[in-house]
Image: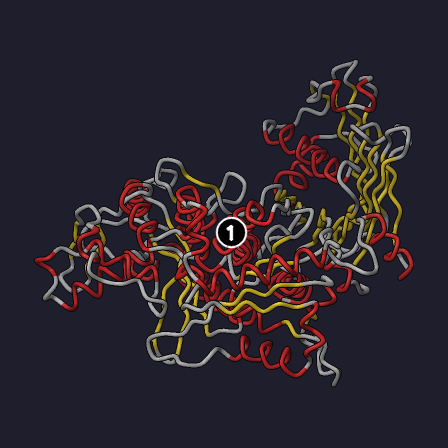
Amino acid sequence: MDNYLKEIEIKGWRSFSPTGVKLKNLKKINLLIGPNNSGKSNIIRFFQSLKYFLTGRPTPNLIAACYMTEKDTWLNLSGDVTGLFKVIHKGEIHNFEIIRKPKENTEILLVDGESTGRSFMNWRHLIVNRISLYTDIRGFVQNTDSNRIEHRFGDTRVSDVIFKRGTYDLEWYKEYIQNMSKWLSKLMNEDVKLEVKLQEYALGQSPYVYDNILSKESKEEEEEFEKKFRFGSRMKRAEFEIRINKGGDELFFEPEELGRGILQFIILLSALYEQKSKEAIVFIEEPETNLHAGAIKELMDILENESLFENHQYFLITHSHAILDKINENYSVYRFEMEESGATSVVSCTTKTDNFSLLDLLGVNPSQMLLSNLVIWVEGPSDRIYINKWIEIYNNKLETNYIEGRNYSFIFYGGSLLDHYYLLDDEGNVDEFIDFLNISRYAAIVCDSDLGDNRTTYKNRVERIRTRLTEKPELNSYIFQWITDGREIENYVPKELFVGVISNKIRKRENFYYAKEKKLHYFSSPNPEMIKEKNFVKDLSFDKFFAEMYIRESELEDEDLKGAIINNISRSFDKVIIANEVVKLWEEQCGLLNSDLDEKMTRLMELIKRANS
């Protein structure tokens, strides 16, 4: 890195007393760790305030009106606030200083002690152009108008940005797709390709970037592009598409279908990739949201080691203890605490015992790695919704009161990510794996059997755990592997509940582009009569089975059209939305209809009881 922050010192800002906080010897990756309400986020809020202040001032104004309120000052006293940043630029240290005086209503900007027009422009370049603040990286927002999970990164839909840039610069887009597909393949242990496409498109128009290339130089084409796609309009937006190669067959998914951790991984890396050519200083708040330990470590490897990001410097504001395993000479770590006076104190952590103190500060005990007594590992968020409902039913049946977050917690492992976990490998061949029992003392691992179609045996990752539990029966006191009797957890749900929800509770699909005829195909409302005489047996895929409700009787003889309808409708089902509606309709007796579900829930409740005894 030729240009980066070497030191940050802030005084008088919010929980930072007049003595201030100082972060010295900053490196490529800088971790700001501490419990809630310890002042970590006030670092990012300070830079946020400077961004607002300087973005609105494109021309030099060295002594400007103060852009703060008394709530931004220490103890709300409206005292002076100062910021001093040591910036390395081509091997030389430069001091950027801002003096903020609310009582005098002034803000003074200096570089190397001087206040000139050039100083202002250097300040503006640093704050506005080089510093990026990612304060909301969950990567999804429920759009109430379209009833879709929207891909968002703060106020930006990253998929829109990637699509638009790809239409201007195809070589950039090809490199982006190649790298994102490589990272996703490694994360998911699958043959994965990522694409970006339009959500909706004109008759005869391809939704993919490759078929919508525009010339940068042509102003008329650019104006036509904006008119054609209207980014920001709900009806003309881009979305990510994941393609997984399964034995020669290419399966298509939206990221959230594979778990919101996958979506977050894509959103964050895509936003950073878009800035790869910049000398960027990036602040990321809670990057671990929705990412399990293996995924957060994979993310950290990419940020640290990929040459694409060699010009980036990162500040991660986090509660995650998993990142501590990655610390090396490229990291600096700072422990944030709140003193009795209400002031934030910051200590640089340079030894292993310092890192132990971080675990204590985060409330991580040596005997556990989560603040719950049992972890239920599930493939995705819809599994959590169903299991929570069934625990509620069995709480009533058994007169117990087990609560998520206190008696048990969930971790999403995203299907193939289960390959990265193991159970007490005595041979020591575990360099690439994470031990379930290092994360919690008790664990339930819920696995879809995926039996059906041409599959008659469990996947290797499921069979490996089952074999291990057979070889070591003593583990059964701590580990319960729940392999679904049907193809997936949805096969436990009575058919009539899905029919009611898909018919009446979720947004209905209106049309799709039928490639064979090169035109839009329009649907009628889903018709339960189309599956009335069919049984929702355990080896059927729930989404494909209930997609048949969209087929008209007149279309039954057209096998190509039927296949296209089932493929498009099944991919449009949002499992999370459907699960939330199903559990609202679930009566207590439904939990006892399936003998395998009753057996599995009885075992799960016994394990929760043991873990909380």
Say left or right for 297 vs 462: right
Instruction: From this view, report whether residue 348 is shown above or below residue 467.
Output: above
Secondary element at image label 1: helix
Furthest toward the left, the residue is: 554
Where is residue 60, by image quadrant? Answer: top right
Where is residue 183, by image quadrant? Answer: bottom right
Q: Position of residue 457 (x, y in %)?
A: 44, 81
Residue at 68% across, 55% down: 609
Amino acid under disc 1: Trp
Furthest toward the bottom, the residue is: 427
**Which quarter of the rendering shows the N terminus?**
bottom right
Q: Nearer the viewer, residue 204 or 548?
A: 548
Q: Position of residue 381 (x, y in %)?
A: 51, 53
Q: Nearer the viewer, residue 566 or 255?
A: 566
Residue at 61% across, 42% down: 129
Q: Nearer the viewer, residue 102 or 279?
A: 102
Say left or right for 43 vs 130: right
Q: Position of residue 289 (x, y in %)?
A: 62, 50
Residue at 56% across, 53% down: 268
Q: Nearer the viewer, residue 435 or 137?
A: 435
The reply to whether residue 367 is visible in this rendering is yes
Residue on which disc 1 sits: 390
